[in-house]
Image: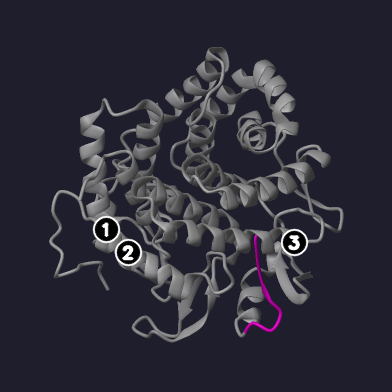
């Protein structure tokens, strides 16, 4: 099925009706337990849900969804956007409460969920745990990665920056403080309740600073920690980015994490010395990704570097229009032979509508020639929703 609406012509930029269809779909099918997961259908052409997939990245994509709603509010002042964020924050609370130690779970769902066995089977390598949320037995998935924290803190930062609502600010402050207190007590390791470590932020001062920068804004007790680390270590944000751009093809999701991290760092004030280091890191990053035909990265650039790039903004509108031609589900795609290849990848970025199917297109390599699955998993569409509302907020698109 294609995202083509016969009643709404696709002009220079597809507008709000498409975004609202995606909003409704997310609410109806992608948040059964208040965080983002994707339904798996019994057949490619069926609407019967057999299970849920991509639970292991639920915290990450819930953060991106919160960011989308924050930009929606920033563009429209929609009270519905505020309520959607509040509902998602309740889901985030589940991911924190259920572990019992304020570490973040990848995802969580009631023990008696009809989809429990499906999800547990898919996520068994990440570790299946049990816990309580509001007195109810839950299952949660561990082995939590930095990706989950960074995606969530991106959403929390956007909500704090863009939504003027005290109730929401209180919730963001409370959740941020709990998560940041825990990871600092564990010396920037992510420690599971059984004592094992799933990963660490050591070696990624840019990511530590992004978490602390939100912490500084929501709770003054983090202010001195952020100030000291930024003054002494801000130049350390440059090195990891400079290393990662040496390989623009593998682990492409790293560039999504880099863009959201640097947006968090550059979207509010700092001394000129500190900001110069963040900006240098971003300049190195964009020198690699600016020709990747990536609408989301372009809008991060718009937010950081401003409006003086009309070609970038026109391209962004085109890339989002092409997104609307992509399938909703995940059929396998193989473009080998259709586009010129260099070793195991395309020589040039594939057009957006020709790229492999996935959960969030902007974190997949635009040079990837083949990928996808059986055509039974439905994507949430956050890879359209988020850049659409960012485009509205940054005046790249006007209905």
Marks 3/1: CA–CA distance: 35 Å
Vertical relation: 316 (above or below) 56 = above
Q: Quadrant of residue 225?
A: top right
Circles 2 and 3: CB distance less than 8 Å? no
Residue at mark 2:
20
Vertical relation: 25 (above or below) 263 = below
Give the image location of residue 81, x and y in percent: 43, 57
In the image, taking residue 329 as reference, residue 144 lies left or right, namely: right
Q: Quadrant of the N terminus?
A: bottom left
Q: Which mark is residue 55?
A: none
Circles 2 and 1: CB distance less than 8 Å? yes
In the image, taking residue 392 as reference, residue 263 lies left or right, namely: right
Give the image location of residue 221, x and y in percent: 75, 32
What segment is highlighted magenta in the picture? 105-113
Q: Quadrant of residue 337?
A: bottom left
Residue at mark 1:
16
Q: Nearer the viewer, residue 166 or 191?
A: 166
SS for dot 1? helix
Whether residue 110 is in magenta: the answer is: yes
Residue at mark 3:
97
Residue 3 in view of the camera: yes
Residue 367 in view of the camera: no
Residue drawn at x 32%, y 64% as measured from the top left: 20
Residue drawn at x 74%, y 65% as measured from the top left: 127
């Amino acid at each position: 099925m294609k995202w083509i609406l016969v009643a709404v012509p696709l002009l220079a930029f597809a507008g709000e009706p498409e975004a609202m269809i995606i909003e409704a779909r997310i609410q109806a099918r992608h948040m059964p337990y208040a965080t983002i997961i994707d339904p798996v259908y019994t057949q490619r052409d069926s609407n019967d849900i057999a299970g849920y997939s991509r639970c292991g990245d639920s915290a990450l994509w819930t953060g991106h969804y919160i960011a989308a709603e924050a930009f929606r509010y920033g563009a429209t002042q929609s009270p519905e956007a505020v309520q959607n964020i509040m509902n998602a924050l309740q889901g985030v609370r589940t991911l924190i409460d259920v572990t019992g130690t304020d570490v973040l779970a990848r995802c969580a769902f009631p023990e008696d969920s009809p989809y429990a066995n499906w999800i547990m089977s898919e996520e068994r390598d990440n570790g299946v745990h049990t816990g309580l949320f509001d007195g109810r037995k839950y299952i949660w998935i561990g082995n939590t990665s930095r990706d989950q924290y960074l995606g969530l803190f991106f959403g929390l930062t956007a909500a704090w920056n863009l939504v003027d609502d005290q109730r929401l600010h209180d919730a963001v402050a409370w959740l941020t403080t709990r998560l940041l207190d825990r990871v600092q007590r564990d010396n920037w390791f992510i420690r599971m309740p059984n004592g094992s470590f799933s990963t660490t932020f050591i070696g990624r001062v840019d990511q530590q600073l992004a978490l602390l920068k939100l912490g500084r804004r929501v709770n003054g007790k983090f202010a001195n920690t952020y100030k000291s680390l930024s003054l002494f270590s801000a130049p350390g944000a440059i090195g990891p980015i400079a290393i990662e751009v040496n390989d623009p093809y593998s682990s492409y999701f790293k560039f999504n994490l880099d863009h959201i991290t640097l947006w968090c760092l550059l979207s509010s004030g700092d001394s000129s010395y500190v900001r110069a280091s963040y900006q240098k890191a971003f300049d190195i990053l964009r020198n690699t990704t600016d020709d990747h035909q990536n609408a989301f990265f372009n809008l991060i650039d718009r937010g950081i570097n401003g409006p003086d790039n009309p070609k970038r903004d026109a391209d962004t509108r085109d890339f989002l229009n092409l997104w609307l031609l992509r399938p909703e589900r995940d059929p396998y795609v193989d473009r080998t032979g259709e586009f010129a290849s260099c070793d195991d990848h395309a020589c040039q970025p594939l057009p957006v509508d020709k790229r492999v199917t996935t959960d969030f297109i902007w974190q997949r390599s635009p040079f990837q020639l083949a990928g996808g699955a059986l055509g039974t998993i439905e994507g949430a569409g956050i890879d359209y929703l988020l850049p659409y509302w960012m485009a509205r907020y940054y005046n790249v698109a006007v209905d």
